[in-house]
Image (spheres, rainbow, N blue to C red):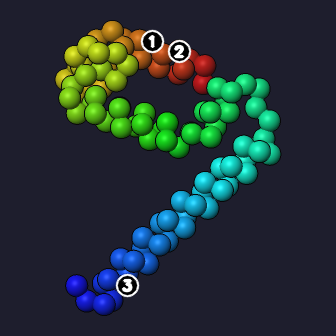
Amino acid sequence: MSFKEWFKKIKKEYDAKKKAEEKAALKEQKSENQEYPNRFVKFYHLNKEKLNKERKGSYSRRRQTGICVRCKRKVVPGIVFCEYHQAKQKEYNQKARQKG
């Protein structure tokens, strides 16, 4: 490994660490300044990014294994929903189109 590559690697790690520290400080500052109606809403807002990342991972995992993304049944081929949720989605789409 050349000096340039080593230096880039060290700089990248340093920047990532610095960014994480800034993010944590900003998060802490937000929680101090903001009033939340209850502890659950506070938890959600402080951990929103992590929770969304977890949700997206769950969605993609289920989609790849052929499980409905809303329940644990097998999916209709080529679609991410089981028969039941596919029918529900069709109803929802029809109602949405009628409103607009």
**Residue contact at pointers 2 and 3, CB within 8 angstroms:** no
Residue at (72, 43) in percent of width and height: 31
Does residue 8 appear in this view? yes
Residue at (61, 61) in percent of width and height: 22
> On the image, numbered disc 2 is attached to which residue?
95
Give the camera-side residue of 30 and 81: 30
- The image position of residue 25, as x and y in percent, is 66, 56
From the image, which quarter does the N terminus lie in? bottom left
Residue at (39, 77) in percent of width and height: 10
Between marks 2 and 3 in the image, the one whose residue lies nearer the viewer: 3
Residue extending farthest to the bottom is 3
Element class at badge 3 = helix
The numbered disc on residue 46 is: none
> On the image, numbered disc 1 is attached to which residue?
91
What is the three-letter code of the residue carrying label 3? Phe
Q: Quadrant of residue 67?
A: top left
Alpha carbon of mark 2 to alpha carbon of mark 1: how far? 6 Å
- The image position of residue 45, as x and y in percent, is 64, 37
Between marks 3 and 1 in the image, the one whose residue lies nearer the viewer: 3
Does residue 82 appear in this view? no
- The image position of residue 17, as x and y in percent, is 49, 65
The numbered disc on residue 7 is: 3
Alpha carbon of mark 2 to alpha carbon of mark 3: how far? 58 Å
Give the camera-side residue of 8 and 98: 8
From the image, which quarter does the C terminus lie in? top right
- The image position of residue 70, as x and y in percent, is 38, 19
**Residue contact at pointers 2 and 1, CB within 8 angstroms:** yes
